[in-house]
Amino acid sequence: MKKLFILLFIVSVSGACRKAPATVQAETKPVQVPAFNSDSAYAYVKAQVDFGPRVPNTAEHKKCAVYLADKLRAFGAAVTEQRATLKAFDGTKLDAVNIIGVYNPDAQRRVLLFAHWDSRPWCDQDADPANHKKPVLGANDGASGVGVLLEMARQFNARKPDVGVDIIFFDAEDYGAPEGVPGNTEDSWCLGTQYWCASPHVPGYQARYGILLDMVGAPGATFYKEQISMYYAPNIVEKVWSVAQKLGFGNYFVNEQGGGVTDDHVYVNKLLQIPSIDIIHYNSNSGHGFGDYWHTVNDNMDNIDKNTLYAVGTTLLNVVYSE
């Protein structure tokens, strides 16, 4: 992830195979949606951050993996820990694990919800060069999306939705090569997602659509309609943004198009052809499009706001329970 680019995506994917987006049925009956608890989501974010940076091959990474899998099990999910040795851009072998929680496994109609749970090994965007070799704590960049999905999992356990739901915490997303380093290609990112797309936990896995959460906890965050999402799954973008607007979260879910981002949803779209979107904070006043703490030592709990978590989680619960 996180290479953000503007107005260039349509040219770069013009030869890609594009699957027709899933048809979204209009809701015809009242839906009872459980309340999203932002205090709970915040606690799940903090629990991850308390382990320290979750960089593959570290003790902190291993401990957090156990925590996440145990939480999903406690919330009634059927859990698969998909382990793999992945090769990074520099040849480093990464002991990675994608953590998958399944609800309503027999349901044919399924929704995929995902986020990455690892954190970046280097603060390569930090203003102080002395920090460039330090790992990122990753409160917003990683832990926030996982925290929202854990709270949603808790609600799924209490009141199962009609549709099948698969929650995936992808690993080794943020091990991409720094700028100017050999191997700095799009495919050096999102390694866990690429592995899962080649070997999904269910052979021939399909879902009606997928929703990625990335950097969804910052105070006053703004989520614009990301370009790759609009290319592959414009009706899912419109569905989610419409729900957010109706719920009064239009200040977060901005009804305008933003940039395009190399992120986990790229591979789910391209390799499995599951129409997928990315809900990701976009800052038009930033040179790189993200918060000024992105890939720095400052990506800590100061950048997590319960109101933002609530807006995202409430919107997604309404989307899922309307299926």
Image: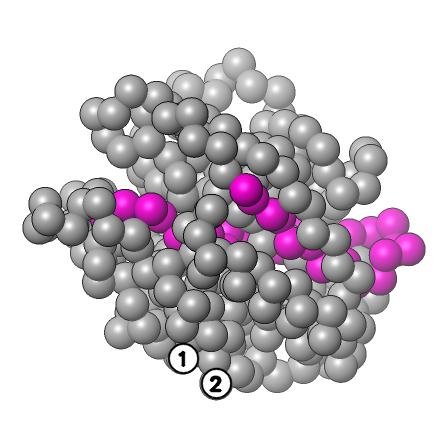
Q: Are the residues tagged 1 and 2 within 8 Å (C-beta)?
A: yes
Q: With 313 as the anchor, is 75 left or right in this view?
A: right
Q: With 126 as the anchor, is 233 left or right in this view?
A: right
Q: Residue at x 46, y 47 (%)?
A: 56
Position of the N terminus by quadrant = top left
What span is colored magenta in the figure? 95-123
Check disc 2 and report its element: helix, strand or loop. Answer: helix
Q: With 200 as the anchor, is 287 left or right in this view?
A: left
The residue indicated by pointer 1 is: 306
* Cα gap from disc 1 to disc 2, whole angstroms: 7 Å
Q: Which mark is residue 39?
A: 2
Q: Position of residue 218 (x, y in %)?
A: 32, 67
Q: Amino acid at mark 2?
A: Asp
Check disc 1 and report its element: helix, strand or loop. Answer: helix
Q: Residue at x 62, y 48 (%)?
A: 98
The residue furthest front is 59
143 vs 43: above or below: above
